[in-house]
Image: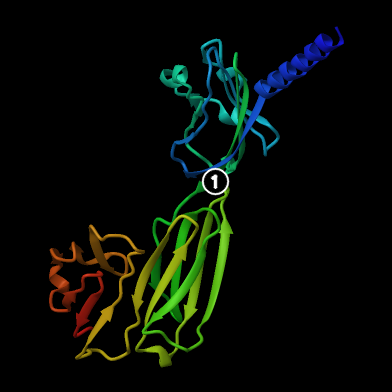
Amino acid sequence: MKMSRMLAGIKCVVFLMVLIFQWTHARGDTEVSCVYMENCTLPCSYEGADVVIHWHQVSAGNLPVHSFFHNQDQPGNSAQRFKGRASTFKDQISRGNASVLLTGVKVQDEARYRCYTSTINGNMESFINLKTDAPVHKVDVYQGENGITCRSEGIYPKPELIWSTSPPSSLTFKNTTTVNQTEQQLYNISSSLILSGSDHDLNFSCTVSTRRNRKSVAFLKMPSQDVLEYENTIPCSPSNITLSNLIWRFNHSQLILNGTVTNYTVSEKWKQHVKKLSESGSLTLQDIS
């Protein structure tokens, strides 16, 4: 009699342990990189039927992002900033896909999210760390009265700007770098480099980088003579990508050449100055004024 009661107690404990295990199960965090103002999918999956899905932004006040139950999306349950921007993949819900599509990703969306699913098999929690990236799209370099300035805009997270010379130089250059953040929390970066007469034989490159990508632009400082009977090569740094198309401009407005490294067209005004284009995209000029 005592033995049967003891066995019954053991069975009960085991049964409760199984229930507890089925009731809540959490997965580790997954990191997702989303591009600013583009659409991004936050992944989540489940097993079972008649699912209830709740998405929350847990690191920003536990804001409700999106809900799905009674076999349909429930947009009324979303916080104002997510209304009309979050949705499930309805045609894939029955196959265990509880992911949410977030449109027009903003910097403010960078946060930790929780996906909660509930079925007859139990409850599940998944956590997603969303990282917003506004990559470097364009770098501008132009000449001023005392030097050159490099500028790039609309970047996130905070970028880094580095000056370099070709050939490498041990000279120290004075530069002033400023970084500003816009209302959209994007970064604009600008750096001015003061030049002197001792660096007349150097080419300068400005590189702006962030965690997603980097872009470089070269600048050739012209000596003071009217006409130079020599040639000079301006390096091109394509950031470890395969060149499919290349455009060289003077002062960001006047076209020098465009095309590929093996098949390009030189503008009429620059035909006498363009000597060759290397496989890396570097441009060799001659008789420059």
Q: In the rendered view, tell whether residue 6 sits above or below residue 30.
A: above
Task: Name the residue: 51% across, 86% down.
Answer: 172
196 or 16, nearer to the observer: 16
38 or 123, nearer to the observer: 123
**Residue 30, quarter of the rendered image:** top right
Colouring scheme applied when the structure was drawn: rainbow
Can residue 148 be seen here?
Answer: yes
Q: Amino acid at mark 1?
A: Lys
**Residue 224, quarter of the rendered image:** bottom left
Q: In the rendered view, tell whether residue 241 sits above or below residue 102.
A: below
Task: Name the residue: 44% across, 36% down.
Answer: 39
Q: In the rendered view, tell whether residue 135 sits above or below residue 161.
A: above
73 or 202, nearer to the observer: 73
Q: Indicate the quadrant containing the C terminus: top left, top right, bottom left or bottom right.
A: bottom left
Can residue 289 be seen here?
Answer: no
Task: Name the residue: 57% across, 40% down.
Answer: 109
* Residue furthest top in the image: 1
102 or 11, nearer to the observer: 11
Mark 1 sits on what residue? 131
Residue 84 locus on image (x, y percent)? 51, 25
Residue 225 left/right relative to 163: left
Query: For numbered disc 1, what is the local secondary structure?
Result: strand
